[in-house]
Image: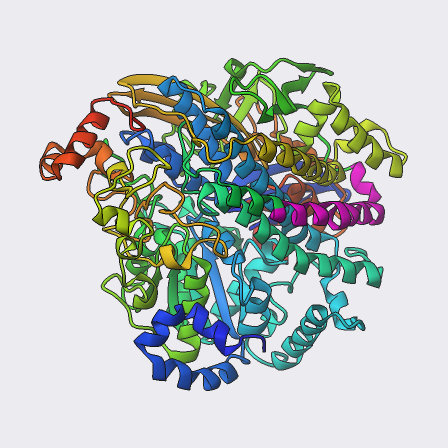
Amino acid sequence: MAKVLLDPISRIEGHLAIELDVQNGRVVDAKCKGDMYRGFENILLGRNPVDANQITQRICGVCPISHGLASSKCLDAAFGIKPNKNGRLLRNLVLAANYLQSHILHFYHLAALDFVDITAILGYKGRDPKLANLKDWARDELSRKKDRADAITAVAPFLPRYEGKDFYIKDQDLNIEAISGYVKALEIRMKAHKMVALFGGRAPHAIGLVPGGVTQVPTREKINEYRSLLEEVEEFVNDVYANHVIAVAKAFPEYFKLGKFNNFLAYGLMDKDEDQKDFLFERGAFYDGKVQKLDTGLIRENVAYARYQSGSNLHPYQGQTVANPNKPGAYTWLKAPRYNGKAMEVGPLARVAIAYLSGNQAVKSELDAILAIFKAEVPAAFSVLGRHASRVIECKLLAQHAYEMLDDLEKGGEPRSTYSIPESGEGEGLVEAPRGALGHWIVVKNRVIANYQAVVPTTWYCGPRDDSGVRGPVEEALIGTPISDVNNPIEAARVVRSFDPCIACAVHVMEGDRDISKFRVC
Amino acid sequence: MSLSRREFLKIMGGTSAALAFPGVVLQGCKKALERVSERTNVIWIQAQSCSGCSVSLLNKVAPDVAGVITEHISLNFHQTLMSGTGHVAVSVLEDAVKKNRKDFVLVVEGSIPTRDDLYCTIGEIDGRHVSAREWIEKLGQNAIAVVAVGTCATGGGIPGAEVRATGDNPTGAKSLASILPDRQIINIGGCPPHPDWIVGTLLHVLLKGVPKLDEQNRPVMYYGKTVHEQCEHLNEYKEGIFAKHWGDEGCLYNLGCLGMDSGCDIPTRKWNDGMNTCTACGAGCIGCTENVFPDYGKRGIFKHLTASAQEIKSLHPETREVVLKLRNGGAING
């Protein structure tokens, strides 16, 4: 048995480590470790409820919009209001734009470097000035730093990396095309962020999200600007991003069989009415072989293996967060959320799976088209590659939906409904973040926050074992993953990154009875 | 070399900076552009951060982020962007410490927990969690310059905010300056900071030395004026037109805008390549560039909503009326 540690998991948001037990070349056990704690929920106590709208966005700088909207929605509920039509549409347009930037960023800048050989640029022979510059830069880095103290940083941040014989794509043209995609995607994701700022004020950390809607009036000029940026981003999604995901899948088809998980939870993406009844991607929970109606009363958070000494198996309304860094047996700062006692995967795959299984025709035709390329059946999608493909499907359908929402806006109309802060109240705010089901729960007393709990996507899938010792989704999905070289466990990194975690995480590998301290993972 | 004189001036603060020290900028420009060909190493540590500052950096235009990391700096370590995972990633930091490297600028994003090292760790060495604090202390000794990016690193920010019931902070989250008391720290406030502030300050340090700093050690060229004095709504303020609802015409003061108390150039520089500003979008300034963010005494972000009786008394009668209405549960939006 080998213990393998990946600490930190880079190219995700935040501090995550993963520890693996590897036997006969396969993962037999895994622990997912969140390595950072800030205490947001405690900091919110006693503050003006409206401050939560801004403060909670700082939980994550990659999807602050989702936190801002979950917070807005729980405040809506606690204040007893609903957004007006413009408010709902503008919130959704801001969210859709952030989906586009987040998914594009995830594939090209976070995940692709586990598949694409970045050193292919050294052999570039074409005339594209950006790629030629990149080649000159990489060569200059290697020669300039060769014998210097900083030699290890040559071609940083792209090198050093895990090295192995068959780790990266060998097709030179495909590598170059993907590197070109990496560069272009930097520009495109920035444009998607411009779309966020048009109606959200700025990105990241949108300033203009408020209970009842947003602060930005949808002027004709802003709507037109959003539309023209959307056209450019959509073209990239359809013509470039989609093709690159298929190309990676063709090069690594075994990842249709790896990183599998079969329970899914989704809160519903893009509400089509102010009562949150109808969605572009359905809400529901899939377990025991069927899609079931969502009941958030079934959510509990377990802390047996998390560094908290507060009560376990509580609903978020009763949730407690008392940190204890040195709690015996605990290995992470993440709690373990459970739905009806079960670990659930959330995120793009969960949304696509639940929509597909609920009979969503648009999602069905997109997923079927991708599966047909690989002559695969639906269960193949419940995998590493299924997650990457699901993000493409979402980007396509969200872009289409965004045009309809732009057309539905009342130009120049009020961007929000009105509210007042009540003496007391409580509310639940459910949003689908790019990374999955996100819920905020607030209790207001004496016009200030008496309790605030956020159950975030990453805790759903990167959470530890629950009170009964059952593994979290990423821990479970890692089981059976082949590790060809315990010193370079790239296969595990691919599985973990397919979930797009939003914390820094580390993976530990131990070899036989050898002490982990003598075992280097580099 | 893609950084033109025009671009250089733009990130250095645009025409206002050129007017502030015209000869220096224009004269120094050519030499500066030559020096830039030696890409200075940057080690970027994320402590208790949300990565928002890094995401903001990705929104850099002219030069864009690809230009920055291939032509102006060498981004040795950055957890969100680097290829290396696990020990491959950490080996870059280990190597810099072991070899006593002195050839890099240290950038820190996020506050640093001081109550327990386990509140934020980056990597394990020989079975021991290495804390963000330890990396920063070790690397901070040797760095050419030390830069705090974002309000978490400049003043503790939201992770360093006070728990109202106890008056303390959950993790003892501190600013970079309190971890490295003997080093001069250049603070780039903002939650998030504008990407021009980050890149412009770094380039200034690399090419022309430390820029002129204000009392919070922030570059005067970006933080020297209040939001209020550059605000799109300044004329409305002077005419006494005040918004009563989010998104209304008028000065946003009554809604809690902190533009009078906060320094930055967003009304003129604008967010996301000119798309919008905090005040133009009708939300108002939340004071995110200031070290006191998000606490402002006991007031919180939306200034008047939880103001004390004393503070309310001192307000202009018209403001007082609105604030009292809000505090008494009246509708903030009319």
Q: Residue at x 49, y 83 (%)?
A: B35
- What colouring style does the render use? rainbow
Q: Quadrant of the C terminus of chain A?
A: bottom right
Residue sitting nearer the eye, B280 or A65? B280
Residue A307 in the figure: left or right of residue B151: right
Q: Quadrant of residue A128?
A: bottom right
> Can the viewer see residue B54 in this picture?
yes
Residue sitting nearer the eye, A250 or B20? B20
Q: Quadrant of residue A487?
A: bottom right
Does residue B14 sit above or below A467 in this rendering? below
Q: How many numbered callouts? A: 0
Residue A81 in the figure: left or right of residue A292: left
Does residue B185 sit above or below A459 in this rendering? below
Q: Position of residue A329 (x, y in %)?
A: 49, 33
Q: Position of residue A20 (x, y in %)?
A: 64, 42
- Residue lying at the far right of the rendered structure: A375
Residue sitting nearer the eye, B145 or A396? A396
Is A504 in the magenta? no
Q: Position of residue B15 (x, y in %)?
A: 38, 71
> Can the viewer see residue A324 in this picture?
no
Does residue B298 sit above or below B86 in this rendering? above
Q: Residue at x 72, y 26 (%)?
A: A353
Residue A458 in the figure: left or right of residue A491: left
Is A246 in the magenta? yes
Does residue B40 sit above or below A84 in this rendering? below
Q: Residue at x 45, y 24 (%)?
A: A83
Residue sitting nearer the eye, A193 or A474? A193
Q: Quadrant of the N terminus of chain A?
A: top right
Q: Position of residue A107 (x, y in %)?
A: 67, 48
Q: What is the magenta range?
A: A228-257
Q: Main secondary structure of the magenta part?
A: helix
